[in-house]
Image (cartoon, rainbow, N blue to C red):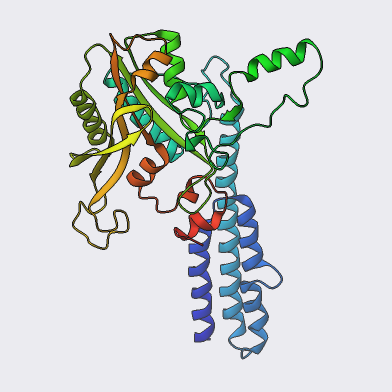
Amino acid sequence: MSDLKQQVENVRSSFGQAVASVMATDALQELRVRYLGKKGELTTLLKSLGKLPPKERPQAGEALNALRDQLEREIEQKKQELTRAEDTAVEVGDRLDVTLPSRGRAVGAFHPVAQTMHEIVSIMQGLGYSVALGPEIEEEHYNFECLNMPSWHPARDMQDTFYFPDEKENAPEGKGQRMLEERMLKGRMLLRTHTSPVQVRSMLQYGAPLRIVCPGKVYRRDNDPTHSPMFNQLEGLLVEEDVSFSVLKGSLRELMNGFFERELKSRFRASYFPFTEPSMELDIECVECSGKNPNCRVCKGTGWLEVCGMGMVHPFVIRSGGVDPERYNGFAFGMGLDRMAMLKYGINDLRLLFDGNVSYFLSGRDV
């Protein structure tokens, strides 16, 4: 009999905990079956009465019947509570006030490259720059000729540039062919290799003085673990009277410190670009180790990161934009937004920015 009393207390205790955690009528029905069904825990105890001595059966049966009544009573009380709660929720949901403003839809986060672009543009707008955009399908004239890259320049080789097929051969006879040939005199059509054509187009449209940043996608025949055939650039252009190189250096230091949200050491190295003269490149201290880790995966132990190319705009480019280079001069700079995003957000694989392979995101490393 003592064993049965202990089993009764165990069932009463476990049932009390279970019924308290039930939050829906469906779950409550499952609980009823678990304890009061044909194979329920209480039913199993009732079937065990036949194994007790005859003198103990009446007392044991009374205890089990009392437990059954208690369980049924608590289940009914819980059912009433849940029913009232569910009815109240339905009533509130059915009431609709059409005068309330819409709640809108939840939106996701920005892609890291888009976030990087917004941050850099915001900093440059604080320095007085406006945003200018241009076509991704560009004419050879604007992409190369106006930027002091003649026909023999290696950057115009087929191995670097995505050219569109020459349409002259398939052009229709008559007026359509003549119009097409006139357009082709400006050069072949291509996917722009940089955002620099936007600088020339903006000077032709707005003249000088001018301060713009040009973000956008560019295309080159690169495809390896550290390069993509499509990537994102941002270029800046300032054309005014009596512009000095010190203004360029100060602007870029302000940009880098603002973007990485701390003071960074920087250095400028001489370089070459056909559309600027003189030309330089900007290095900043490693954002990962600040030059203190000889085994740093980001800077390879050098302590420096190359982030930007720049220079004073070549007079030929200013003239191509319809501006008098005798009166105006200026500077230009350009950087890869993908690289800037990887540096700021600690992304160590370029493919994470573009690829749909979920295993890259799960592993966080090359696969």
- Give the side of residue 24 with respect to residue 345, left or right: right
Residue at 42% x, 20% y: name it: 199
Res 51 seen here: yes
Seen in the picture, residue 296 relative to 140 is either above or below; the reply is below
Task: Give the residue displayed 42% in from the left and 41% down from the top.
Answer: 338
Q: Nearer the viewer, residue 164 or 202?
A: 164
Is 309 positioned to the left or the right of 73 in the image? left
Give 330 or 302, whichever is nearer the viewer. Answer: 330
Q: Is residue 323 left or right of residue 265?
A: right
Residue 64 in which image quadrant: bottom right
Residue 293 at x, y percent in the picture: 22, 60
Q: Looking at the image, can residue 130 be seen? A: no
Using the image, determine if residue 15 lies above or below residue 298.
below
Name which quarter of the figure residue 273 lies in.
Answer: top left
Residue lying at the far right of the rendered structure: 173
Percent x, y for residue 355?
A: 55, 48
